[in-house]
């Protein structure tokens, strides 16, 4: 028997003393853990920097101190934000013993939004905005015009380069912030023009009467001297730009949201009411002939995608007011069913904006408003205003009631259809469709994934190549129904849609339960041609309209099968684009133009480029897909469909978690997503034609 020597037990205090305690000073915590302050160092976090600086300018406008804001994207990835507000204070701060400007820019939780008279209403809660942007920028400069002078201070990665300096006299008022995101923090510092434009357009509706300009100088090749210019637009340079100014506020926003939809009543409801001299409720709405609702709630101009107390108050008041009006005016009978919340929401486009002195959000992302008082404020203001609107506009009121009646009848029909589906599914065993090849019983949903594939051919190959333990296959026959304008009863009458609904397991509509989701990866796998793209779009429409939670929580993916298989001897390489194909060919010392006429292969047919050992050309017949080259021996196969791959190839390229490429479907801009689905999948042909013509140059079409 071998006796083991035991090591002496370590002291409980060994290696841990006061010397091991790290104290991060100034803005060091931000650079050490940027995700705690901006969520991520990816694209969302990068754009958050601009949002923080913009929010400060917007808060000046919300307070009535500014009416002209300019955002400029400058060369070398600099960003410049200007407002004509009061200007950041530059006088001596008693607590920090330095200028107030330096305090705000270099100290966390310092600002005018914690009390006092700096701001009655603002979007900022924590006072970390400007200082966090400073910490995460390689360079920053702040120029302030106020009190008859022009003052400035520059910073490098959160640290001042010199004290605040007075540069001269000025009869202007406002603040200019110029910064460059730090490449040490962000992998890529390229801002998305469309994303910024859409966000600032939205903000322009919310702060009516304020001019917002955005300019893009990033590709401008001439000299740009902004040292003596307050607004860069005054230089008159020819660059792409947008300028937004809306007197109508939320009313204008509703008009914009509905511009591609058919409205069912003429007048847009709008109300704005100030409460307690500092808090405001503003609501606008209009109904359309659509079956989806578009409700955008904002608190202090911050979009709340998860809603909150203000949205709850609005929905409660809307349902009660419409039911009361309908019964009082005999539009529905006393014994008839009352409208539910879902009935009165169908086809509704509404924007709710509250401005609160003391505001609370649930969580760090401000996605949901938690201020309890907001519910009562919205409920009271909206009930009074909407009841008056319906009394004054009886034709509009009747159109709204009829729309809700149609929704009520459809709800009853849909419930009967869903009950039928569930009953039938239960009788057929575990509610699963027969053509579903499910993964092994007992596999946890967190590990399970389902491939929704196009056609029985691809389905058969996928079934052979899959990992049966975790991967399920659901082949679709033909194109699924376009559900953009289809009600649930009609939708569930379509065999392919019904199969998807049953297979996923969450149910649909008011019975949707995400805890019953059977697969945590729902993977759309279609062919790389026009029909495949159409089927993929139809499926995305289904998930976005009826399973939006699955999209928002990241359960929906798109498979990326390769376009080419390039084979040299026994080695095989896969290319997912023409550019990748050309790079692989370049590694073989073969110029892309030498195989530029590669044609599509079907089944086992391949293009051949051959070489003779004696240096003479040897020609081998491989049909119309043959090419000859003296330098190398390569076969190139162009895949058009998943069914053209054998099981091993499909597993290796598209299904193997170690090698495959999946694109996760995300919603970055809910308003824009709604608009695009309406245009592409709805009934407005002129809008769809205009969209296709405007974006045709961006498309890569493989017919």
Image: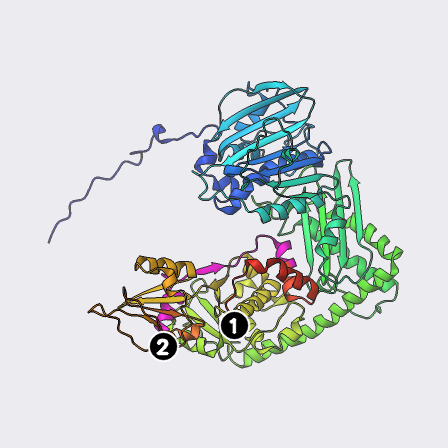
Q: Is residue 612 above or below residue 360?
A: below
Q: Nearer the viewer, residue 346 or 115?
A: 346
Lateral position of residue 456 relative to residue 55, left or right: left
| Residue 110 locus on image (x, y percent) | 58, 29
Query: Is residue 518 in view?
Result: yes
Element type at marker 1?
Answer: helix
Q: Position of residue 436 (x, y in %)?
A: 48, 76
Label 2: how many residues lie within 10 Å, few (<14), some (14-19) or many (20+)? few
Question: How many numbered tags mark residues here?
Answer: 2
Residue drawn at 37 percent across, 74 percent down: 646
Q: Is residue 253 left or right of residue 183?
A: right
Q: Quadrant of residue 28?
A: top left
Q: Nearer the viewer, residue 472 or 395?
A: 395
Q: Which residue is mark 1?
A: 503
Q: Please indicate, yes or no, whether residue 338 appears anywhere in the rendered image.
A: no
Residues under numbered marks 2 and 1 in contact, where contact means CB atoms less than 8 Å apart: no
**Circle 1: is it few (<14), some (14-19), or many (20+) Cα within 10 Å?**
many
| Residue 208 screen position, x and y as percent | 74, 42
Instruction: Give the Cα separation between the discs numbered 2 and 1.
Output: 34 Å
Residue 512 vertical position relative to residue 14 in the rendered view, above or below: below
Using the rendered view, name the quadrant where residue 372 is placed. Answer: top right
- Which residue is drawn at the image coordinates 42% and 66% (left, top)? 563
User: Does residue 655 belong to the magenta stretch?
Assistant: yes
**In the image, which residues are magenta?**
646-675
Q: x%, y% of residue 253?
A: 72, 50
Seen at 44% across and 39% down, the residue is 185
């Amino acid at each position: 028997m071998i006796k083991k020597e035991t090591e002496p037990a370590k002291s409980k205090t060994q290696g841990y003393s006061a010397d091991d305690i790290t104290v991060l000073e100034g803005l060091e915590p931000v650079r050490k853990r940027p995700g705690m302050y901006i969520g991520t160092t990816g694209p969302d976090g990068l754009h958050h920097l601009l949002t923080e600086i913009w929010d400060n300018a917007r808060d000046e406008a919300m307070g009535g101190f500014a009416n002209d804001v300019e955002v400029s994207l400058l060369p070398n990835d600099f960003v410049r934000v200007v407002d004509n507000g009061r200007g950041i204070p530059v006088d001596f701060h008693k607590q920090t013993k330095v200028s107030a400007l330096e305090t705000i820019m270099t100290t966390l939780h310092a600002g005018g939004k914690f009390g006092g008279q700096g701001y009655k209403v603002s979007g900022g809660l924590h006072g970390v905005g400007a200082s966090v942007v400073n910490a995460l920028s390689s360079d920053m400069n702040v120029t302030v015009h106020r009190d008859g002078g022009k003052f400035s201070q520059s910073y490098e990665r959160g640290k001042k380069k010199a004290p605040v300096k007075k540069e001269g006299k000025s009869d202007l008022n406002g603040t200019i912030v110029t910064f460059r995101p730090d490449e040490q923090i962000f992998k890529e510092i390229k801002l998305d023009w469309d994303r910024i434009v859409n966000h600032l357009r939205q903000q322009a509706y919310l702060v009516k009467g304020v001019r917002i300009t955005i300019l893009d100088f990033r590709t401008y090749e001439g000299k740009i001297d902004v040292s003596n210019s307050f607004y860069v637009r005054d230089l008159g340079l020819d660059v792409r730009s947008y300028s937004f100014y809306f007197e109508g506020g939320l009313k204008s926003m509703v008009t914009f949201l509905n511009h591609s939809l058919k409205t069912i009543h003429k007048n847009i409801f709008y109300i704005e009411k100030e409460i307690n001299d500092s808090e405001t409720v503003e609501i606008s709405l209009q109904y359309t002939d659509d079956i989806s609702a578009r409700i955008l709630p904002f608190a202090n101009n911050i979009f709340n995608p998860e809603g909150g107390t203000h949205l709850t108050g609005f929905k409660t008041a809307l349902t009660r007011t419409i039911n009361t009006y309908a019964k009082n005016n005999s539009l529905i009978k006393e014994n008839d069913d009352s409208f539910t919340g879902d009935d009165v929401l169908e086809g509704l486009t509404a924007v709710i904006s509250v401005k609160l002195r003391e505001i609370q959000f649930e969580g760090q992302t401000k996605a949901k408003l938690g201020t309890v008082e907001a519910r009562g404020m919205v409920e009271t203001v909206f009930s009074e205003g909407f009841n008056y609107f319906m009394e004054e506009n009886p034709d509009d009121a009747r159109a709204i009631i009829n729309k809700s009646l149609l929704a009520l009848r459809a709800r009853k029909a849909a419930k009967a259809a869903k009950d039928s589906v569930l009953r039938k599914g239960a009788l057929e065993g575990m509610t699963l469709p027969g053509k579903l090849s499910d993964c092994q019983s007992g596999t946890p949903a967190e590990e399970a994934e389902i491939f929704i594939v196009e056609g029985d051919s691809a389905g058969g190959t996928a079934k052979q190549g899959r990992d049966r333990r975790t991967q399920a296959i659901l082949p679709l026959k033909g194109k699924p129904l376009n559900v953009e304008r289809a009600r649930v009863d009609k939708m569930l009458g379509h065999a392919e849609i019904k199969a998807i609904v049953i297979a996923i397991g969450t149910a649909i509509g008011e019975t949707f339960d995400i805890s019953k989701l059977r697969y945590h990866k729902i993977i759309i796998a279609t062919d790389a041609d026009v029909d495949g793209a159409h089927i993929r779009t139809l499926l995305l429409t289904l998930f976005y309209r009826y399973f939006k939670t699955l999209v928002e929580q990241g359960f929906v993916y798109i498979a990326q099968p390769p376009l080419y298989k390039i084979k040299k001897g026994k080695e095989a390489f896969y290319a997912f684009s023409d550019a990748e194909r050309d790079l692989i060919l370049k590694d073989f010392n073969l110029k892309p133009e030498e195989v530029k006429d590669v044609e599509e292969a079907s089944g086992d047919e391949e293009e051949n480029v051959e070489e003779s050992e004696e240096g003479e050309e040897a020609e081998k017949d491989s049909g119309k897909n043959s090419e000859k080259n003296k330098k190398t021996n390569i076969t190139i196969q162009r895949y058009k469909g998943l069914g053209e791959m054998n099981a091993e190839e499909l597993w290796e390229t598209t299904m193997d978690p170690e090698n495959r490429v999946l694109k996760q479907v995300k919603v970055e801009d809910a308003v824009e997503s709604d608009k695009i689905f309406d245009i592409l999948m709805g009934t407005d042909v002129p809008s769809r034609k205009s969209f296709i013509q405007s974006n045709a140059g961006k498309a890569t079409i493989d017919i």
